[in-house]
Amino acid sequence: MGLIETDKSLDDCLTESATFQMPYALRRLFATILVFCEATNIRALWEKHLESMSEDYRRTQSNQAVLEQMVLRDIRDLVHSMGKDIKSYGLPELVETGDGSGDLLREVREELSVGVDQEHLDLYTSLNIEQRAGFEEILDHVVNNRKHVLFVDGPGGTGKTYLYKALLAKVRSLGKIAIATATSGIATSIMPGGRTTHSRFKIPIKLMDNSTCSFTKQSGTAELLRRASLIIWDEVAMTKRQAVEALDRSLQDIMGCVMPFGGKVVVFGGDFRQVLPVVPRGIRAQITDGTLQRSYL
Ligand SMILES: Nc1ncnc2c1ncn2[C@@H]1O[C@H](COP(=O)(O)OP(=O)(O)OP(=O)(O)O)[C@@H](O)[C@H]1O
């Protein structure tokens, strides 16, 4: 392929992953490579790995051009969730087809296809006392559908992500949908199937006190959230309260339930000792007003 050394190792990484990863995981890996690695010949990587990235779609679709568009759409969404635009990577052109509402269950299928690592399932055995108590408590809520909002508080490095990984693996191994999100793109890349909250919940960039998420009741996102048994939002302390309140309103709306977050089991994680939300040119009062502690929630 005439790739330089960096591209060669990225190519090897994709080739190796294709032997044991599901196509959706490969598409996520490809998107991560686009955003976080410095590949010089992206087009060559794309052409070489398109086949393994489209293997699941190939079962129902034989037209190569349509297949390419399906994979491109996924990569576009994944790259977008990491805060980037697919147009900047020189991939084949994506033909936009309206709002995507025609494929209602795509997001549900994708979420269900996130693999469960045995390694993550095994983390349970090494959880410390606090992590295990959190694990059992949250799992009990999920399994018994006990509607509740929980908070995992802990300074950086105390093992919150470790706990999420164990939890996500367990819940997914039960065939349930667990949605993993975080405020920043970096944190989402650590959690399997992770997406940024803005991308996953379609939280508007310009937030007001009465904002709602910008998905419709008929959208794939709404369907995914209706079916979700667990929603994790990490790094919530860095988020403006209006973003969390927007999700609360939208979940109540799509669930037709006035309980907080429409009665979903929602786990917020974060550390209020770390970073405050960013309020551009905001004075101290505006910044503290944006924090979750000031929320009606
Ligand atoms: N029970 C455990 N057994 C072994 N290692 C652990 C355990 N819990 C956490 N760790 C390790 O400790 C380190 C920090 O954990 P982790 O990344 O989960 O913390 P965190 O609270 O998410 O941190 P941050 O908020 O900075 O992201 C990681 O390397 C993780 O593998």
Image (tube, grey):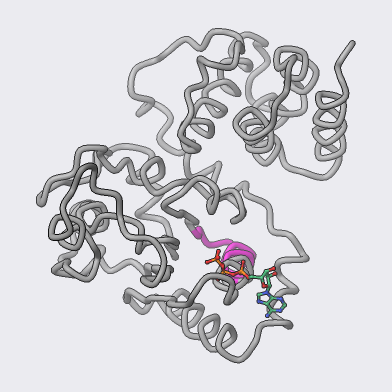
The residue closer to the viewer here, 247 or 5, is 5
Q: Quadrant of the C terminus?
A: bottom left
Q: Going 89% across and 11% down the picture, which residue do you hit?
A: 2
Q: Quadrant of the N terminus?
A: top right
Residue 56 image-quadrant placement: top right
Q: Which stretch appears magenta?
A: 167-178
**Residue 293 versus residue 275 in the image, above or below:** below
Q: Going 71% across and 36% down the picture, which residue do you hit?
A: 26
The residue closer to the viewer here, 286 or 167, is 286
Residue 203 x %, y %: 29, 43
The residue closer to the viewer here, 86 or 101, is 86
Q: Going 59% across and 86% down the picture, which residue do you hit?
A: 132
The residue closer to the viewer here, 30 or 285, is 285
* Residue reaching furthest to the bottom: 129
**Residue 233 versus residue 210 in the image, above or below:** below
Q: Is residue 89 left or right of residue 15?
A: left
Residue 141 x %, y %: 43, 79
Residue 39 among those drawn in magenta: no
Residue 282 x %, y %: 18, 48
